């Protein structure tokens, strides 16, 4: 457990030294959210309709931007090999890295999304549901994305390749995440969606570190 | 019994086996195709609602089935490959992928051509077509990943992992797309046939499916032979092959 | 036989474009796949022969 927290703190410290990388992902989210009204038109009713979907897709793409660097920096300076060879269970260490990635790339999106939701004229309870669904969904994105990052370590075309690998796997999270806000808006209630997001989060957190470890070992051979 | 399987797991023995099998499989595929098309186009009656247009199902449904079966086969070989670390498993998976992607594309193409006259639009966000689209993306992802990694063994194993992860996700994806579809779809459009399909139609579809199955086996055998030659070309047994040592191919 | 004339067969009761568009694409893709597999095989054999030439100059 100590190893887990040490790794999280270390990754956070490293991330803060590279603020530009972290912030660029967030700025991307802001920009993308602004592009859609520009493309579709400022009509409030339309924006309210597409808002949850647009923000969810934006969050998805923004959290994907930072995935290539999840393992790459450590791989380049050799610390990844140390992690793999260390006596600590690799799964636990990987989970630490994924958690740190989420804290830095996913959690800020959760905080930003309601603000951007105001641009889409979403009602307050929709903003709350948006934040909640992203809170449950972005960790799943980090977990699944990490598998893609581990598989494509050092491979050319990395970022786009990760997207191609990982976006289809994100579809269930997207459907239920954005769907939760839609359901709330249409008065149906989003309990089922939230339950399902939780049901996806728990296996993702358990399964992903194991898959990532396998992928890292494949990549490092 | 297990020794027998492991015997054929060696590229050298599999090369011979595949070489003997594929012509027969191709012939069977050809015969089944003729039979299926004969039933489908010459014998089967027109549909009550869809007229002659429904005949697209004789390729659409078998192609969809094949795209799913092939992906399962890829996942199977991937599990085998990661567990037993055999080289052949990686080759089988790589050989299956292009055909699977082709059938997935065909399923989408024929689905669109079926949807246009029946429901007016080239694309219908039907749960099954949408899941098929995502399956197509999964195939593309596998092919892209294995092509991007230069080291063959690493590429095989990375591909195996993504194939397994994808296979686990396919039911989740299908379920979520189905949910999404029922919520958003007004009128219920479905590309499924009614249960009371005429016997001949069912037979036609079945024969075409078996034909595609045989075709897939044939082409995979053929492709694996190619991969074996590429990868094992430095070995004595490949160099001694008639195709390589002799003057002509 | 269901079809009275060849013309009926091609028209497919008005759905000709869609039915033959589907069958046609199927045939084209299968053909292309077989050609590609064959060409890849020839290339592999050429590679193997080149390997042999390298070893026995």
Image (cartoon, coloured by chain):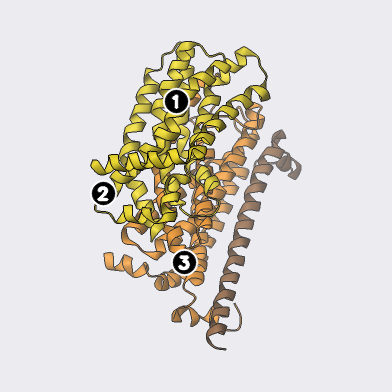
Chain colours: A yellow, B orange, C brown
Q: Alpha carbon of mark 3 to alpha carbon of mark 2: how far?
A: 46 Å
Of labels 1 and 3, the one closer to you? 1
Same chain for labels 2 and 1? Say yes or no.
Answer: yes
Q: Quadrant of the C terminus of chain A?
A: bottom left
Name the residue nearer the viewer: A211 or A128.
Answer: A128
In the rendered view, tell whether residue A33 sits above or below residue A76: above
Name the residue: 56% across, 29% down: B125
Name the residue: 64% across, 43% down: C22
Q: Percent from the top left, x then y, of residue B105? A: 58, 45
Q: Alpha carbon of mark 2 to alpha carbon of mark 1: how far?
A: 30 Å
Q: Percent from the top left, x then y, of residue B210? A: 49, 51
Q: Alpha carbon of mark 1 to alpha carbon of mark 3: how far?
A: 57 Å
Q: Quadrant of residue A121?
A: top right
Is disc 2 surrounded by few (<14), some (14 to 19) or many (20+) residues within 10 Å? some
Q: Quadrant of the N terminus of chain A?
A: top left
Q: Secondary structure at mark 2?
A: loop
Question: Which chain hosts label 2?
Answer: A
Q: Percent from the top left, x then y, of residue A133? A: 42, 23
Give residue B21's mark: 3
Name the residue: 63% across, 29% down: B118
Q: Secondary structure at mark 1?
A: helix
Q: Earlier in the sequence, mark 2 or mark 1?
A: 2
A215 left or right, relative to B124: left
Give residue A89's mark: 2
Q: Which residue is mark 1?
A: A110
Question: Which chain hosts label 1?
Answer: A
Q: Percent from the top left, x then y, of residue B50? A: 62, 30
Is residue B59 visible from the viewing direction of this image?
no
Same chain for labels 1 and 3? Say yes or no.
Answer: no
Residue at far bottom of view: C57
Name the residue: 49% across, 53% down: B213
Name the residue nearer the viewer: A70 or B102.
Answer: A70
């Amino acid at each position: 457990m100590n190893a887990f927290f040490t790794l999280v703190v270390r990754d956070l410290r490293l991330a803060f030294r590279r603020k530009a990388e972290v912030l660029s992902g967030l700025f991307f989210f802001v920009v993308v959210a602004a592009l859609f009204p520009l493309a579709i038109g400022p009509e409030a009713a339309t924006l309210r309709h597409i808002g949850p979907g647009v923000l969810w897709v934006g969050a998805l793409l923004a959290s994907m931007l930072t995935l290539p660097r999840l393992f790459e920096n450590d791989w380049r300076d050799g610390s990844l090999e140390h992690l793999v060879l260390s006596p600590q269970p690799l799964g636990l260490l990987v989970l630490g890295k994924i958690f740190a990635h989420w804290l830095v790339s996913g959690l800020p999106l959760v905080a930003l999304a309601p603000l951007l939701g105001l641009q889409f004229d979403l009602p307050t309870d929709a903003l709350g549901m948006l934040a909640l669904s992203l809170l449950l969904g972005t960790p799943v994105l980090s977990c699944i994305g990490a598998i893609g990052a581990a598989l494509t370590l050092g491979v050319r075309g990395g970022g786009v390749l990760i997207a191609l690998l990982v976006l289809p796997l994100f579809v269930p999270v997207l459907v239920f995440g954005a769907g939760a806000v839609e359901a709330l808006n249409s008065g149906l209630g989003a309990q089922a969606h939230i339950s399902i997001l939780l049901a996806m989060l728990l296996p993702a957190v358990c399964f992903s570190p194991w898959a990532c470890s396998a992928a890292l070992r494949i990549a490092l051979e | 019994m297990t020794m027998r399987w492991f015997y054929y797991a060696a590229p050298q023995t599999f090369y011979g086996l595949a070489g003997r099998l594929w012509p027969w499989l191709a012939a069977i595929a050809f015969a089944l195709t003729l039979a299926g098309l004969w039933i489908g186009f010459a014998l089967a009656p027109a549909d009550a609602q869809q007229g002659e247009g429904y005949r697209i199902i004789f390729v659409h449904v078998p192609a969809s089935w094949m795209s799913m079966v092939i992906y399962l086969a890829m996942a199977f070989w991937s599990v085998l490959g990661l567990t037993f670390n055999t080289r052949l498993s990686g080759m089988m998976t790589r050989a299956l992928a292009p055909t699977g992607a082709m059938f997935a594309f065909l399923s989408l193409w024929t689905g669109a051509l079926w949807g246009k006259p029946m429901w007016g639009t080239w694309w219908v966000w039907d749960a099954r077509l949408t899941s098929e689209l995502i399956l197509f993306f999964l195939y593309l992802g596998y092919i892209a990943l294995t092509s991007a990694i230069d080291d063959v063994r690493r590429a095989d194993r990375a591909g195996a992992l993504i194939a397994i992860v994808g296979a686990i996700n396919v039911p989740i994806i299908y379920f979520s797309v189905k949910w999404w579809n029922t919520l958003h779809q007004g009128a219920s459009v479905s590309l499924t046939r009614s249960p009371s399909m005429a016997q001949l139609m069912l037979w036609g579809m079945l024969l075409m499916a078996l034909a595609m199955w045989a075709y897939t086996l044939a082409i995979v055998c053929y492709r694996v032979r190619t991969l074996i030659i590429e990868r094992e070309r430095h070995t004595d047994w490949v160099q001694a092959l008639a195709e390589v040592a002799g003057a002509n191919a | 036989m269901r079809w009275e004339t060849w013309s009926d067969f091609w028209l497919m009761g008005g759905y000709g474009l869609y039915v033959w568009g589907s069958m046609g694409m199927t045939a084209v893709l299968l053909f292309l796949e077989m050609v590609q597999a064959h060409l890849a095989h020839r290339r592999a054999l050429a590679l193997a022969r080149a390997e042999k030439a390298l070893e026995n100059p």
